[in-house]
Amino acid sequence: MRTVAKRVLVTGGAGFLGSHLCERLLARGDDVLCVDNYFTGRKDNIAHLLHQPNFEPMRHDITFPLYVEVDEIYNLACPASPIHYQFDPVQTTKTSVIGAINMLGLAKRVKAKILQASTSEVYGDPIVHPQDESYRGNVNPIGPRACYDEGKRCAETLFFDYHRQHKVKIRVVRIFNTYGPRMHPNDGRVVSNFIVQALKNEPITLYGDGSQTRAFCYVDDLIDGFVRMMDASDETVGPINLGNPVETSVAELAKIIIDLTGSRSTITYRPLPVDDPVQRCPDISQAESVLGWQPRMPLRTGLQRTIAYFETLLREHGAIPAPKTAAA
Ligand SMILES: NC(=O)c1ccc[n+]([C@@H]2O[C@H](COP(=O)([O-])OP(=O)(O)OC[C@H]3O[C@@H](n4cnc5c(N)ncnc54)[C@H](O)[C@@H]3O)[C@@H](O)[C@H]2O)c1
């Protein structure tokens, strides 16, 4: 007897994480509907999947209702980097909040499982290190990052209320810094910034004194965590942190990237942006015990793969495509 493929909706499927997720789901035989409004996503990210009969791209903005029949939903749609989510902060909040309502309504109607890509930003600028899931955060509700942080916090609230009130089968993961091929070259995030600057032999910009730490998770490891979470029992609702608990200072990261690229870049220092967290590091004990998950990719290997991707981009485009910013 032929087994019927699972129908899986990935919102934000043409983005950095979404495109890797679509790839992974297709590889295991799922039928994938990739929904995206291409605000930060790129058709190039999914071009290699278009020939697959189980893959269907659809241009749609999740702030509007969507009527499709699916078994599982991964809700990833939302600009993720400060440059992008601050470009149109009202739309960012709408995407998180109205988007969550629309996707949860869909999950309720078709009885689909739904996973929310939440974020470590729900912890704000944390005063507890490392952050476990019980930490309630230190978020400025009126600052420039609030459209993202508070939008994601409200989305989590909605997920848990739909679960309690309507018995929707939810999963919530809180993602920490993730990097890898198909990151946006110009999104102002530290890994992409440093790699592009190093490849162009331009000065590497360090914000603050570079002692602030980040914990970098390679994209393949993260996607593995997503799939494990979706496949876990329905009692496993989360929230569960997914990220790499190994901290690296931003200055150390710059040194590794200069070394791996053989760059002639020097380092320049700039003031820290408003509300930029000084330290952020996940406690992943829950992911380890409940999902049997932990990141495996060594930082240097992951960075080598990411550098190779950016080298190709630079070669193909001659220059890195411009970002969507207010100035652009
Ligand atoms: N990459 C990370 O380190 C990280 C960390 C924490 C959380 N996350 C979360 O993971 C998700 C994916 O992040 P990413 O890094 O792939 O970012 P991304 O910007 O590459 O992907 C987001 C995708 O959502 C699409 N999108 C935005 N608004 C939409 C809307 N209203 N309707 C339909 N599509 C829309 C964009 O076009 C893009 O393709 C986001 O929800 C983000 O908040 C990512």
Image (tube, helix red, strand yellow):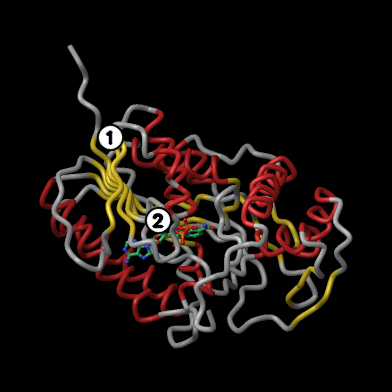
Task: Provide the secondary structure element on which disc 2 rests.
Answer: strand
Camera-nearest residue between 142 and 185: 185
Instruction: Write the residue at 80% across / 64% down.
Output: 251
Quarter assignment of residue 71? top left
Residue type beneath disc 2: Ala
Q: Residue furthest left?
A: 109
Q: CA distance from mark 2 to mark 1?
A: 20 Å
- Does the residue tagged 2 have its C-beta within 8 Å of any atom of ligand 1? yes
For the image, the number of numbered tags is 2
**Farthest top residue?**
1
- Front tag of 2 and 1: 1
Residue ID for mark 1? 31
Q: Position of residue 259 (x, y in %)?
A: 85, 51
Q: Label 1: state its secondary structure.
A: strand
Give the residue pinned by disc 2.
Answer: 117
Q: x, y (%) of residue 134?
A: 45, 61
Residue 151 falls left or right of residue 288: left
Q: Residue flagged by tag 1: what amino acid is it?
A: Asp
| Lower position in the chain sequence, tag 2 or tag 1 | 1
Residue 224, above or below 10 = above
Q: For ligand 1, which image quadrant applies?
A: bottom left
